[in-house]
Image (cartoon, rainbow, N blue to C red):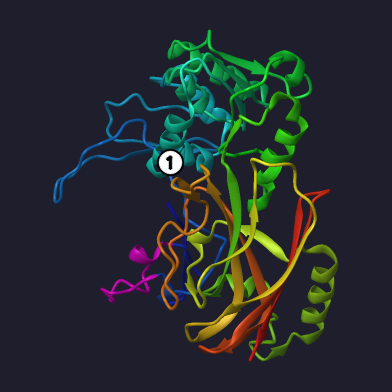
Amino acid sequence: MWWDITMDPAGEVLLSCAPYWAHPDTQDKPAASGADLPWRDHWMQAIYYLPREVRVRRREEFNLVSSHDEYSLWFSVNDSDDVPVPGEVSDPAPICLCGLHVTVSRTRAGAMNDPRRQQAYTAALRAAVTPGCTVLVISEACVYAVLAARMGARRVYVLESSRITRRALEMYCRDNDVDDVVQFVEADTAAAAVGEPVDLVFGEPFFYGSVLPWHDLHFWYRKQQLAALCSEKTKTIPHSAELRCVGVEYRDLWKIRAPLGAVEGFKMDIFDDLIESACQVADAPCEPHPLWEYPARALTEPRTLATLPLADSAPSDLQLTGHLDVTAEGSCNGAALWMEWLLDESGEHRLSAGPVQPVEPGAAVAWDRYGRQAALLLRQPRPVRPGHRLRFEQRFTAKDGELQLQLDVEP
C-alpha cells in the first residue's frame, strides 16, 4: 500500500510514494530501477500479511477485499473469508510460535527462519554436542536449546531475560518433548542454579538491547561473569568473532549527514554549520542501519579490524591504526562495518552478519537482511581511484563495549 497526492488543481504535479515498479514516473521505462527516482527514507510503503496464503496464476483474477474502521485497514482475499478484525485472532498458529512472534521483531523472526543461519548453527552444534553433555545458552529469543536437547544433551540451561519470551520458549520446549531437559535460569543466580561445569557455552548471539553490531559481544561479557561454570574442556560457540570493514560508495545513505549547501537558490550555510556542530556533540560516528535497504558499491576489499577470542577471557582495550587500499574508482562517502561469527575453532562454520556473498570492489554489496550493520558516513564525499588509501583509527573500550572509528581518505 502507498499513497499519491495531487499537488495542484490541474492535476499536473503528482507526489507518489509508490515503489519504483509501480511509480508513475517509471511506467514508460521498462528498465527502470529505484535509482531513477528521488531517494527518500520516509513516506515508505506498507505491507499487510493476508490471513492465508493464496496461490495465483498469471491472467487469473481473484478478489481482494479491503476493510477499515476509524483507525485501521485490513484485507481478506474474498468475501467468504473470515475477515480478521484488529485485536481479534482467527485460526491462530500453534501457541508457542504465536508467542515467539509477539515477543520479537519481524526482523528477528526472519532471522529465526533464515536457512543460512539454521544450517550454520545446526552444523556447529552437531559437531560440539555429545550424548550426556551439559549446555549453557547465553542468548535471547533463542530456539537452539531445543536442538541441543534433541541431539542428546543431558541438560541445557538457558539464560533468557524476557519473561514473555521465556514463557513462549517453555511452551516450545513442551511441544518438542524436551521440557525435562531444558531449564531456564536467571542471569543473576545462574552460577548457583547450574551448580556444575558445563561442556558447551552457546550463543547466536542475539540480545534485545543490541543496537550496533558489536553490542552482541555482550555474550563475551556474560560468559566471563559465569567463568566459574567453565573449565579448560568447555567449548564455546561462537569460538571467536571478527569485526570487519569495507570502504563504500553509498548511493543515497550519505545524504543524511551531508550539508545542504544551496537549495532552490537559498544558501543554507548557517543551517549546515548549526547541524554539524550539534552532530559533533550528540551523534556517534557509526550509525546502525539495515544496509540491504541502502545500495552501496564496494571500493575496497573487506578488512578484518579485530579478531576477538570469545573462548578466552573477556576483552581488553584495543587500539588500531591502519589502511584500506582502494581498488575501484568511485566517490567514497563512508564505510560499512559488521561482525562475522566463527562458530568453531577451525573456522569451517562461519556466519556473516554483513555481506552474504563475496565482496567484489566496484560491485554492489549483498547484505544480510536480518540484522543491522554499522555505517560510518563522511561529511563530504571524496573521489577515489586505485592507489588511494582509506586511513582508519579504531579504539575499542572494554569497560563499556563501545567502538570509536575515524576514517579519512589519503591520496
Task: Write down the residue under mark 1.
Answer: 120
**Residue pictured at 56% horizontal, 88% vertical:** 384
Quick one: which residue is furthest to the top in this view? 180
In the rendered image, residue 13, in percent from the top left (x then y), is placed at: 46, 75
Q: Is residue 32 in the magenta section? A: yes
* Quarter-of-image position of residue 378: bottom right
* Quarter-of-image position of residue 194: top right
Report the magenta residues as a range.
18-33
In the rendered image, residue 345, in percent from the top left (x then y), is placed at: 53, 44
Q: Is residue 8 above or below residue 395?
A: below
Inspect this view and state whether residue 123 appears.
yes
Q: Give the main secondary structure, helix, strand or loop, of the magenta stretch.
A: loop
Q: Is residue 95 above or below residue 327?
A: above
* Quarter-of-image position of residue 43: bottom right
Q: Is residue 57 above or below residue 278?
A: above
Q: Nearer the viewer, residue 402 or 136?
A: 136
Which secondary structure lies at badge 1? helix
